[in-house]
Amino acid sequence: MTSNIEKTSLRDLLCGSVTEEYLGKKLTVCGWVAKRREHGEHLAFVDIRDRSGVVQAVVDGSVDVRSEYVVRVTGTVTSRPTGTINDKLTTGKVELTDCVIEILSAAEPPPFQLDDRVEIDEQVRLRYRYLDLRRDKMQQNLRLRAAVNASLRAAMDSQGFCEVETPLLWAPTPEGAREFVVPSRLHPGEFYVLPQSPQIAKQLLMVGGFDRYYQIARCLRDEDLRADRQFEFTQLDIEASFATQEDIMGFISKAVLDAAEVATGTRPTEIASMTWVEALDLYGTDKPDLRFGMVLQDLSSVFAQTEVKAFAAPIVKAMRVPGGAEFSRSKLDALTEQAKALGAKGLAWFRVTGEGLDSPLERFLNDDEQRAIATCDGAQVGDLVLCVADEHVLACRTLGSLRVTLGSPPVSQGEPKYLWVTEFPMFEGVDEDGNLQAAHHPFTMPHLDDLDLIENEPLKVRSQAYDLVLNGWELGSGSVRIHRSDIQGRIFAALGISDEEAESRFGFLMGAFKFGAPPHAGFAFGIDRLVAIFAGEENIREVIAYPKTQSGADVMTGAPKNLTERQIRELRIKIQPKV
């Protein structure tokens, strides 16, 4: 009756599996002491915990064990006496009696409680991460992550993808985020970098004829840390030949929805889609959270002939805040300052009351303008309407940021809302030298209908790039790649990249393309972010076994640390003094 999966040479099964089906049987379990309670001198109750749960062991006489001792317990499974059943435990109807306890490892008292009932300082948790991992919450999160990884692999395997591991030591590529640099001992003065992503490696696999590649890839970026970003992160990375944007979105949608079903027990409906322009106009961001309303409204036509200077702008966007009329003046001032910090000239606010609008600007508006604001998005008495008049993108993004501030629910609340965002701009502004900047990366295929705009109106060019968003978190990005040398040359020229510079930076990729590159497209999304949302966590550190702190330190190991003088000599590097 005992499980062959759970059974080892030291135990018969896991603690959480000791149930009524084993009544009368003598069993051995192993685990950590969670609690010890003595009833006089002749009876002791010891709760034994492992990854599966807790079982109560009854010992005749006193027992010399303490919290977190590692023990092996042998006893007979019996029903708990009437009135002592614990319905909160899967083992709550039984206990082990006539127990013999063998101490496998003694333990010092832990620096914090491991039962999730006490809030623990994060620095302490990370300092003793090996103890923190024993807590039920961390056990559940990391096992959830393992289940998600397994489902992603199964989804990709079922769609004909081949798992290929790409190098962790790679060539420096002056693109994207800052890279972690690794000095070479055998080639003094030369360096590898740790990959930001397997982007170029997987495109070369397409040239190599692998057709459909995937990898659960470890990636590293030397960027500032925040709730959804770590130096090290894990992504599902895919690439497919002879595939369109729709094909890639289909592959990824199956993988994500399969993972969601495994993680939550419910399969979400098909993933919605909207263009970048639609997302910006409606939500003020390219990663909208669709769990709540507060959709942006365009009042530009109403204010086209306005005499109010505050509304004399290329576009006027507005947003209804349900119940916002109760906001204090100090809160409204704080929202105004937030809008200005985002680059807007200001923020106009209007309380909707039974007598009309309440605002410093109300008396300057004509009847049509007042009516448009008072009825904005079905506004009712007690609501607040916020308006920004400015350039199109700035006005939308300002209100989009305020929308998140005022309305975004916690990660754990609401039905998950997945969204594909498509048709991103090909270019975004110019750098300090006046050269265009690629919005995605320079190998992204432009929208074929916009090829004639590349030289003369480049900022109007749409790309074949697409993002997957979940609850306001960008899970990942992808694109159709450029496989034609003529189009690639035009994009390099638009970006101010000369033939010589292109050869220096991307020569080995462009050289490979000369030998027959199939049309191909790909995608990558962050597994850390996906699992964090499934687990209802606001910070991806809670689903990573050994994360770094906000400052990038590992307080458990003390990393980063100094090298020894011998190591520095071998690498032939020189350490500059701190300034």
Image (tube, grey):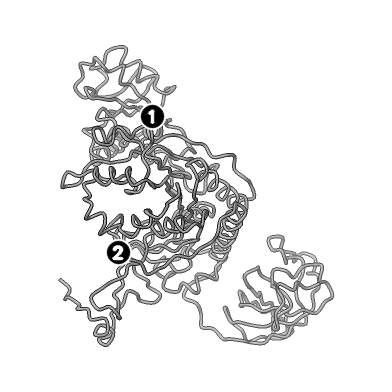
Q: Is residue 568 left or right of residue 166?
A: left
Is label 1 or label 2 in front?
A: 2
Q: Residue at x 36, y 60 (%)?
A: 196
Q: Earlier in the sequence, mark 1 or mark 2?
A: 2
Q: Is residue 38 left or right of residue 441?
A: right
Give the secondary structure at mark 2: loop
Q: Which residue is mark 1?
A: 296
Rendering quarter of residue 86: bottom right
Rendering quarter of residue 424: top left
Measuring from the top left, give residue 139's x and y in whole percent.
56, 66
Q: Which residue is mark 2?
A: 172
Packing grade of label 1 (10 A; few <14, some 14-19, many >=20) is many
Q: Is residue 406 left or right of residue 305?
A: right
Which quarter of the rendering shows the C terminus?
bottom left
As drawn, the residue found furthest toward the front would be: 515
Cβ atoms at labels 1 and 2 below 8 Å apart? no
Packing grade of label 2 (10 A; few <14, some 14-19, many >=20) is some
**What's under tag 2, amino acid-wise?**
Pro
Q: Residue at x 35, y 76 (%)?
A: 558
Measuring from the top left, give residue 70's x and y in whole percent.
60, 82
Image vertical order of residue 98 relative to residue 307, above or below: below
Measuring from the top left, give residue 108's x and y in whole percent.
51, 83
**What's under tag 1, amino acid-wise?**
Leu
Numbered label tally: 2
Rendering quarter of residue 57: bottom right
Q: How far is the residue under mark 1 from the one under mark 2?
A: 42 Å
